Amino acid sequence: MTVSTRSFAISMAKPEASPPPLPQIDTTGVGLGLAAITLVAAITIGFLAGVGMALLTILTGALLGAILLVWHSLRTLAGDADVDVGLELAHARAPTDLAERKQRALRALKDIEQEHALGKIDDVDFAALDADYRAQAKEVIREIDDSLEPFREKAEALVREHLEKHPIKEEPVAEDDDEDDGDVECPKCETINDPDAAFCKKGGEKLA
Amino acid sequence: MWNTFPLFGSALLLCIMLAASYTFAVSLYAGSTGKARSLQAARFGAYGTVAFTAVAVFALAYAFVSHDFRLRYVAHYSDRSMSIGYLFTALWGGQDGSLLWWLFLLSLYIGACVKWLGKRYVELQPYIIATLMAVVIFFCVLMTYSANPFATSIGGARADGEGLNPLLQNFYMIIHPPSLYIGFVGCSVPFAFAVAALVTGRLDAEWIVACRKWTLFAWLFLAIGNTLGMLWAYEELGWGGYWAWDPVENAAFMPFLTASAFVHSVMIQERRGLLKVWNVALVIGTFLMTIFGTFLTRSGAIASVHSFAQSSIGTYFVWFIVLAFIFCFTLVLYRWPELRNLVTDNKDDVRKLRIAAMATGWTMFLICLPGNYALSRLGMSSVAQVVIDTVVCGAAVYVGIEVVYRRLTQNVDYESQRPTLESAISREFTFLLNNWALLGFLLFVLVATTFPMLSEALSGEKVTVGPPYYNVWVQPLGLTIFALMGIGTLFGWKKTSTAALKRAFVAPTVAMLAAIVLHFSLGKVLGFPAVVWGDAIYGGAMGTVLRGFNAFTPVIGFSLCVFNAAVIIQEYAMLFRSRKKTGAGKEASWLWPVGFAFSVIAVLGLVLMRKSFPSAPTFAFTVVVTSLVALVAPYFLFTLISLPHASRRRYGGYIVHFGLVFVFFGFTGKSWTIDREASMSPHEHYQVAGYDLEYLGPRMELDVNKRMVFGDVAVTRNGAKLGVASPAKFMYKKMPDSPTTEVSMMHSLRDDLYLVVGSINPQTKVASFQIHLNPLVSWIWFGAIILIFGSIVCMWPQLEPAESRVWAFARGAAGATAAFTLGIIIAAMPAPAWAQQQGTSSLHAGTVHIENEREHALFNSLRCMCGTCARDLLSTCSCSDADEAREGLRRKIAQGETNDQIILEYAQQYGAEALAIPPNQGGMRAIYAVPLVAIAAGGAGVVVLIRRWRGSKGDDKKNDDNAKKAKKKDDDDDDGSGGSKRDALDDRLDEELRDLDG
């Protein structure tokens, strides 16, 4: 648990300085710590003073926990605590109609495959259904690709822009031996074989 | 602080309410602005609410443990002599505490759900949290204003409390309410997902996939809770049965039915995008039913064994249900365009559609409500009015909106977006049938359960709906569902080829026919005749038809059990055959020798325990079954573990069905129940169905709480000594006027011997016994265990391992371990099964004398009006008032009156509520007529729906012919380009299919 203090005087004196970091509190750590302490205390007190006192101990711990949780919630709301990065980035796109249809078409194909394997759909019906759903699925995939087209172009443009600013340094190409590390040369015909080959792939000569 | 501990507790309730309200507000804010910061704040607020609830529960627990009798609730339900275990149990022993307990379980669910949601479903999360918080707030309001567990009594702290009712001081009280509540409360989570989906408009399969495991979990605990309730009634309450169709039992059963329907219909939405409105309605209905169920239990609206005290609490529930209904109804109407796939990019159009839906929906609803009045002018019974009105309302809303939409969407083409079905011969169709059947059954139980309440509220006429009514009607309805369960499994998704379907029917049908023949020929010999005639509950044609059908339910039930078992075994055989073809699972063939080893060990163990088996046939049967199961189990479990996700759910579902087969088999046993009475002097023998009972004599014991009088009976069966049963009467010091009856039971696979002792004459030592023989009951409990196992298989998390030999080995090892563990558990079970059981209490102290069949029929149709028992029939109530009533009726029989005359006079004397079941006349017919009509209408609806879904695809035969022609053409066309032309996209498709779910 690290807490860094703020110094209001200093921050007021230098307006351009970035705001001081928020106090970092490892909530999971605190939570688990509190729970562990409460449990240990409860068991100890339970042995010493009976079940009633143990319950009171747990009660106290839970009360502390409740207050801390609500306090942390208020801090988050007020902006004094960091938001979990994962949550920030987790805004899912709305499941589009296209994505749903693709999912359904794929599920349908899987179903038909399974029912065919089990013998509930015979070959004639299977062929017809499979073709039908494949056509549907392909249509949906084509539509998805089309809808992504403008974004693809934009992505390529962005990459090109980035590469112009930060070009990739070309490394000098190392002299290539005929043998890569590990490759085995056949003693008879000098063909290069894979490292784990037992016999030469050309003439069948036994390799070491 | 100690002076104000009760105040501290009450303050805690307000803290929970405050934290929940805060979280509610923040989560709504997070939902509308989409800010991650607010969402995180809401999540922590939810955790805070959970923590506060825990504090409140621990506070109440502390109050119990420290015997703080200032609290009214603690003083009422505990005393200084109770053990710690029962002190904790008393937490949920009464109204107030059980509400807090409900809240506690809800908060545990909320904590788990919020943790599980994590970074997923961020669009839905805020509204899920908000909905759950709203439910929390409701329960807080309930407790603060109506049922505060921390309230103090006006008289101050007492010296000692009243103590928990001895009836409740048993093992089952410890586990039945918690497990059932876990099921009830669990239904809030799918509800929250559904509301979140409706609010955000994300109404495709996302929310369904998200809440799948939660739904299964809640369903599982509803099943467990109901089973434990049955066990409790059977082992403890001492009336010889396990289900009395008590309103509270029905209240726990109904959400189970809707949840079962839901887990099936979601599969249609996932695959087809159909039934969106239906699924949303089902989930909302399930949740409302759990709230309604707990309302029935607590408000005292219906007399029941479970009755809590009468209080104002019912009003709060009614308001909550009404408000929740209005909210959900409007929400569904608002989202009608999304639910019907009618959303286009034109915002104006969509807005018009929304307003149209809401306006039409509410207008139709409000028009139909006063339709009640119109119906009453037609002379219908008030209950019929209400039910007809509700059903008509729903239909009117739906039809009204559809009609309006048709007009509004005339210019836009929606046809292309309408989902279609290839074939009606498919699982899609049979799952629809499943929903229809389950919901029909639900409606039947709902109408029967609420009939007394509605009848009294609306027309002042009191009626009783007793067990005979349910028992007679449930047989045809239940067996239909059971039959559909097997038939539906034979169909495949999308389309089942007719030839394949016919093939699939062969083996199970042959098995079923063989079972019928076997039953008719061997039934009587074995003591399980195929046809058993019972009493008709009505006169006239309806009564005769029902009686006729129910006479054959033993053989129908048994043969359907065999049919269903054969279907499931066949499905697994098909699975193993197809896996063999693809070579899957070959790497685990070492599990067969492992299974063989287990088999040998098991047989050796059984041989060593030969002495503990009562008879040679039982021993042989056990050896055969155990060796087979041990042989197959490791490889079977390995297969289950290695199945891909969707398949595992399917085959896990089959295991659940298999458990249900066992359960239904247990239910058929009810037809062969034998009830006897005997008064015996010491060392007298009594014979019944192969059992020989020798009354050894009375015995008295004393302990701290009670005086116990036992009547020991030595039980022998077919010559083999089974042990000594000791039914007893307990006289508790706290309740000296109402001795409780302790049941003694001997279980076996074949039947349960159930002994109750009535009175023991101190001088002559003559004891009067009630002897019940309940066949096949243990199969119900085995079935429940298999059902639980099947659910766990369905819920098992998906592993994402790389396909390597190591993983295959690991799965094999897991399979073997699971088999071994299961074996140990199952091996440990027969020990208590053959040992003697001691039960506890019953409600009345005497015994019931019934001389002949006619008396049985008569007493079965009349209620005991002593006022202390709830709905007990004259044939089962053993109080002194019932004895007098029976004597009076016997005199009337002796005078030559017919049963019908006697029933009429009894009804005139005590009112219509004295009849066990509503008479079959006039408006009372509504109780079965309305559900039957609704079921028929539902069936018609299913047909219409299937037709619409088939759309323009035409009929199956035409499609089959077209398919054959197309294939022939492809074959003829063989010019090298092949029948189906593969292109680049096909490869991509194959790749995506491989990744779909492994």
Image (spheres, helix red, strand yellow):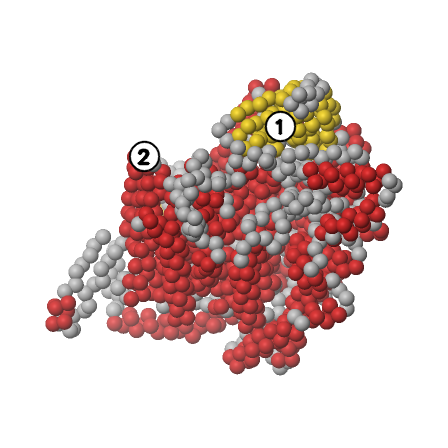
Picture coordinates of residue B845 (x, y %)? 64, 34
- Residue B503 vertical placement versus B277 (above, below): above
- Report the chain holding disc 1: B
Residue positioned 38% across, 46% down in the render: B58
Label 1: element kind:
loop
Picture coordinates of residue B469 (x, y %)? 73, 48
Tag 1: residue type?
A: Pro
- Residue B446 vertical placement versus B949 (above, below): above
Residue positioned 55% across, 61% down in the render: B315
Tag 2: residue type?
A: Phe
Label 2: element kind:
helix
Residue that badge 1 annotates: B727
- Is there one chain holding both mark 2 and mark 1? no
Instruction: Compare residues B343 and B308 and report the one nearer the observer.
Output: B308
For the residues carrying marks 2 and 1, which lies nearer the camera in this image?
1
What's the mark number on residue B345? none
Neighbor class of circle 1 (other Cα within 10 Å; few <14, some 14-19, many 20+) is: many
Instruction: Compare residues B667 and B910 and report the one nearer the observer.
Output: B910
Is residue B446 among what the camera can see? yes
Which of the 4 image quarters holds residue B839? top right
Residue positioned 33% across, 40% down in the render: A54
Residue that badge 2 annotates: A47
- Report the chain holding disc 2: A
Residue lying at the far front in this picture: please name it.
Answer: B155
Picture coordinates of residue A44 (x, y %)? 30, 37
Is residue B839 among what the camera can see? no
Picture coordinates of residue B502 (x, y %)? 74, 49
Label 2 – label 1 distance at C-alpha = 40 Å
